Image (cartoon, rainbow, N blue to C red):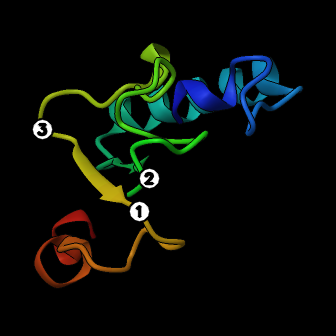
Amino acid sequence: MQEEHFTAGCPLWLPSGTLVLANKVKLVNTARRIGIALVHVRHVSQNPNASMFAHNRKYFEFVCDVSPLDGEYVVTKSGLGAFYDNDLVPRNFYKFG
């Protein structure tokens, strides 16, 4: 999850973000502890002047509590789906089995 979801005033701010983040931290930590591979999705707007997910915006980065660790897969997407126009499925899907 990116900072855009947890910063009041951002277009995609989640009012219940504290609860959402606490649950995601538990989920990510449990997956890491028991060896389940994680795939992180980074949203990036193709428009550098966009009000959301522009790579030059202050709130573009992953929330530090759930940021990818070295070796964890990061999918960068600019469309609606995380499985469109990337190599997650053809090259890496079965690796995460």
Distance from the alpha carbon under mark 3 to that under mark 1? 22 Å
Q: In this view, does 44 lie above or below 93?
A: above
Q: Quadrant of residue 89?
A: bottom left
Q: Position of residue 21 (x, y in %)?
A: 67, 25
For disc 1, the neighbor class at 10 Å (few under 14, some 14 to 19, many from 20) is some
For disc 2, the neighbor class at 10 Å (few under 14, some 14 to 19, many from 20) is some
Amino acid on which disc 1 is placed: Ser
Residue to which mark 1 is pinned: 78
Mark before the other along the chain sequence, 3 or 1: 3
Residue to which mark 2 is pinned: 45
Front one among 50 and 62: 50
Q: Position of residue 14 (x, y in %)?
A: 81, 32
Residue at 67% x, 31% y is 5
Residue at 44% x, 53% y is 45
Residue to which mark 3 is pinned: 71
Residue at 12% x, 38% y is 71
Q: Is residue 94 above or below residue 63?
A: below
